[in-house]
Image: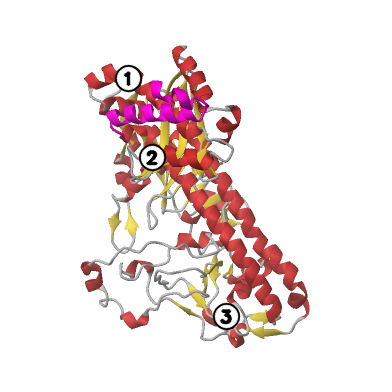
Amino acid sequence: MDKRWNTYSLEEVARLVSGRTPDRERKEYYAKEGTPWVKIENLNQGFITRTAEYLSEEGREKVNLVPENSVLFSIVGTVGKVGIAGRELATNQQIVALIFDETKILPMFGYYCLRYHAREIRKLSNQTTMALISRKTLGQYRITIPESLEEQQQILEQLQKFENYGKKKEKTREKISQYETVLFEKIFCDEIQYHEKLTLQEFLRESVFSGVQRKEELHEEFPAIDSGEFEKPYLTEKKIEETTKEAASGVGKSFRKEMLSPVQNGDILIRNGKIILVDNQENKRYMDRSILCIRTKETQLLPEVLYAYLKLPQINGILYASRKPGDSRKRPIRAGELEKMKIPYFTMEKQKEYARFLKKIRRIQRSLDQETEKAWKVFAGVARNLMNGYEKRIQEEIPKETREENTPNIRICHLILAALAGWCPSDERAGEYYRRRQEIFRMAQPYFQPAALSFVTKQGQQDYLLERDFLAYHSEKISKEWVTPLELLRKLLEQYEREDVTDAHLAFHGEKGICTEADWDLEVVLRMAKESWKLMAEFSGYRECVFLM
């Protein structure tokens, strides 16, 4: 075991504090402003300073307050959601706060640790009708962390750099989503203000309905729509695995099959004020009882138009409103109330125009989804390497005699492969370079897409996320700075001789998800580096000299 990394249980490095819920009948405990009171839906993978509900001065006395930088972890229902307190706050009983000993572990490092280990911790939960993990079980979970706080900080900086890239992609997607409402208001401003309004019931081909079972009661044969999918305005397509016989045999004990029907393209789904338009669904998906479904007569009202109308701020507030005046709690609209809602009469010609625009927006959003998913996969791969002690793991996996004999060569090979992956010509040769580069990487992996590379320096690491351009993944910065790949490689080798650069690492999308060059056989790496050298020489103008290499 590397002495720089130590293993502790969470209770050895943090104080675990359970949340509480003040008496709901005592309205004086709650307020519009005051101490944030965090529930699971507020755990947003980041700092929390604002919440839907707040506690008054009287309410503060009935809970366990936790300080700024406390890490929040959900232990009931959706186990494993993580957040971090951006100020002093309180939580309900479904959340445990971890107040880390800052002489052993930085709070932000503890936050990333819990995010990284959430899946494994989730496996410890009691899977009954509702997943549950006790505070004691959570406290006994063991994590391995660097002894040095400086090293923890270096790892944090790397993680935050890759996480910010993912967040940037998400913000772009959110900005595109805002165009839906702006466009709708522009096209239908006259209809919204002046046209006659009819009840929604007059536009429906069947009554508004919901699922009949709780999500936990739906078996694998009937894959349920997850509440998290309502964070997007459309239903995410998921690959549905073939149902096991055991799951199928369990169906019918709690409900009849004919009671369930899958959602259809054109359905509008509403859950706690959040809306999904089902527009590109191939696999069968089912609703639980928390979701309402609307099906319109498309000869009178297109689902795209009703979906956009219901998302208007002044209308959306009705879908998830306060239970009573002065009550901070909200309740979702009921089916009968929804059917009585007044809807303007929209001109069909304008409806079709808006539907065409929305389809174009959806194509852009789904393309951004793919880019965002890729960014988060890169982040997950980087986290896997950094949280496991990347350098230590590489050294342990390589046999000692091989390590001693080949370490300098292997590091030079890493530099060659990093240069090959990071650089790409900016002219018409890009397609050919990409195709031949793929052939080299297929020596190690049948499927390979480079995602990121890092150069290890005295100051830490220089990281480059690789983006797709003209069918080739590369770093735009590296490609602009270096006219040829051999110029880049020569600079890297000079820095290696001076020990300014000591190694390079690759992260890539492979058959097993995000992988690194540590997953490749050493002999294969040596062979790939030789072929890479030849390819880079050719694209640097030394085609006649390739045979010498």
Q: Residue furthest front?
A: 544
Provide the residue designation for mark 2.
439
Circle 3 crowding by C-alpha within 10 Å: few under 14, some 14–19, many from 20 = few
Q: Give the vertical position of 373 relative to 549 (above or below).
A: below
Residue linked to disc 3? 337
**Viewer-nearest of discs 3 and 1:** 1
The percent coordinates of residue 356 (x first, y second) are: 63, 70
- First of labels 2, 1 by sequence position: 1
- The residues colored magenta run 520-549
Q: On screen, 311 above or below 2?
A: below
The disc label shown at residue 289, or none = none
> Which label's residue is closer to the chain start, 3 or 2?
3
Label 3 sits on a secondary structure element that is helix
Q: Is residue 547 magenta?
A: yes
Which amino acid type corresponds to the residue marked 2 in the rendered image?
Glu
Residue beneath disc 1: 407
What residue is rendered at 39% in x and 67% in y?
Answer: 224
Q: Quadrant of the N terminus?
A: top left
Q: Is residue 16 visible?
A: no
Mark 3 vs mark 1, CA separation in Å: 71 Å
Label 1 crowd (10 A; few <14 / some 14-19 / many >=20): some
- Type of the residue with mark 1: Thr
Q: Nearer the viewer, mark 2 or mark 1?
A: 2
Residue 107 within the magenta-colored segment of the rendering: no
As helix, strand or loop, the secondary structure at mark 2 comes to: helix
- Gap between marks 3 and 2 measured at Cα: 61 Å
Quadrant the C terminus occupies: top left
Q: Measured along the vertical axis of the image, is residue 130 above or below residue 382?
A: below
Give the CA distance from mark 2 to mark 1: 25 Å
Name the residue rendered at 34%, 66% in the picture. Answer: 216
Q: Earlier in the sequence, mark 3 or mark 1?
A: 3
In the drawing, does residue 249 fall left or right of residue 438?
left
